[in-house]
Amino acid sequence: MGNENKKRVLLTGSLGQIGSELAFALADRYGAENTFTSDVREDSHGILEGAGTFVELDVLSKSDFDSIVRDNDIDTIYHLAALLSAIAEEKPQMAWEINMEGLVNALEVSKENGCSLFVPSSIGAFGPDTPLDNTPQDTIMRPHSMYGVTKVSGELLCDYYNMRFGVDTRGVRFPGIISSKTLPGGGTTDYAVEIYYHAILYGSYTCCLKAGTSLDMMYMPDAIKAAIDLMEADPASLRHRNAFNVTAMHFDPEIIAAEIRKHIPEFTMDYEIDPVRQAIAESWPNYMDDSAAREEWDWLPEYDLARMTDEMLKELGERYGRGELEIES
Ligand code: NAD
């Protein structure tokens, strides 16, 4: 590694919320000719067009995974294929299969082909016994959700492959990711994306989490920066390879609604609580301490709630032709 121009990159789960934007950032950085995107689904709407070569890959097929890596001289894998928290509670067995067996395949393929491997963990790896304020980097991890169980197991497995086999595994615990390109895939923090769409399209929103439920969040450009910066970091400086707390902001539904009202004063919000998502959210940190990431690889987010809200409303306002809402900066 070291010479970034030499990287040949494969993304799994590329059609999802993160992959559909990370793919373009990787193609920009390493060249479209060195970027390979993949998903179990076809790219039927061409959303990855221009971000390198797309191939269909079910991460549960180790032999297909291996062939794609070998045939294309891949040296770096961003493994994003997974089921997210709310979906994983509906289909726990399938979540175990995709999140764990898929990960074991990614690790084995990386081991056999000498690839570096990025695997995102999540704030979902924490549980109700974790200190929820200023959640430390190293702390109690006893999640009650299937998603969390797979994320903690994944962190441990990535550490194991690094210590036992020398695989260059790296990862962050992403908070809720907010973006305007691809809708989120069924997580507990999805409300913080939907609220912007509903503000633009309808001027009102029914929130599934209670007022006062604080969670860490991050705007997509910072999530992309975190993934790429960590993969570019000097490995000698990394003590926590696979589970860096990273955050950019934290808020509850009332705070984000108030921020939206600064641009759309008539915006209203009411509540219809989803007990599954609420229970999960209450077991996750109110806000995390991400000083290990700041110290070990200079993590520094660029977007706070105000700047993100400004961009989200501008972007969605332009897309849905609601410029007349007078979105102010
Ligand atoms: P997503 O649900 O939007 O996308 C996941 C993609 O994986 C989908 O396109 C899906 O088709 C694909 N997929 C599912 N099963 C597959 C299989 N067997 N083989 C290949 N592809 C398969 O998820 P995302 O939000 O982009 O998340 C990516 C990663 O980041 C996940 O590991 C997730 O746990 C983690 N993460 C996301 C968030 C967030 O807020 N989005 C927060 C924390 C962690």
Image (cartoon, rainbow, N blue to C red):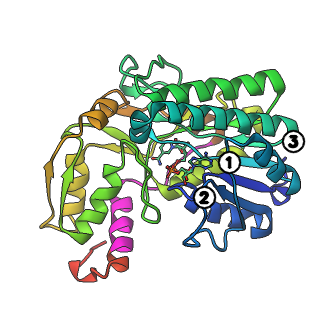
> To which residue does mark 2 refer?
22
Residue 314 located within the stretch drawn in magenta: yes
At 67% from the left edge and 25% from the top edge, which residue is drawn?
157
> To which residue does mark 1 refer?
78
At 66% from the left edge and 44% from the top edge, which residue is drawn?
230
> To which residue does mark 3 refer?
113
Q: Nearer the viewer, residue 168 or 62?
A: 62
Q: Nearer the viewer, residue 111 or 258?
A: 111
Residue contact at pointers 1 and 2, CB within 8 angstroms: yes
* Whether the residue under disc 2 has CB within 8 Å of ligand 1: no
* Mark pair 1, 3: CA separation: 14 Å
Q: Find residue 145 and report its image quarter.
A: top left
Q: Earlier in the sequence, mark 2 or mark 3?
A: 2
Q: Nearer the viewer, residue 113 or 97?
A: 97
Is label 3 in a helix, a strand or a loop?
helix
Q: Main secondary structure of the magenta part?
A: helix
* Whether the residue under disc 1 has CB within 8 Å of ligand 1: no
User: 10 Å neighbourhood of mark 3: few (<14), some, or many (≥20)?
Assistant: some
* Mark pair 1, 2: CA separation: 9 Å
The residues colored magenta run 298-316
Is label 2 in a helix, a strand or a loop?
helix
Q: Position of residue 195 (x, y in %)?
A: 27, 57
Quadrant in which the C terminus is drawn: bottom left
* Mark pair 2, 3: CA separation: 23 Å
Residue contact at pointers 2 and 3, CB within 8 angstroms: no
Q: Amino acid at mark 1?
A: Tyr
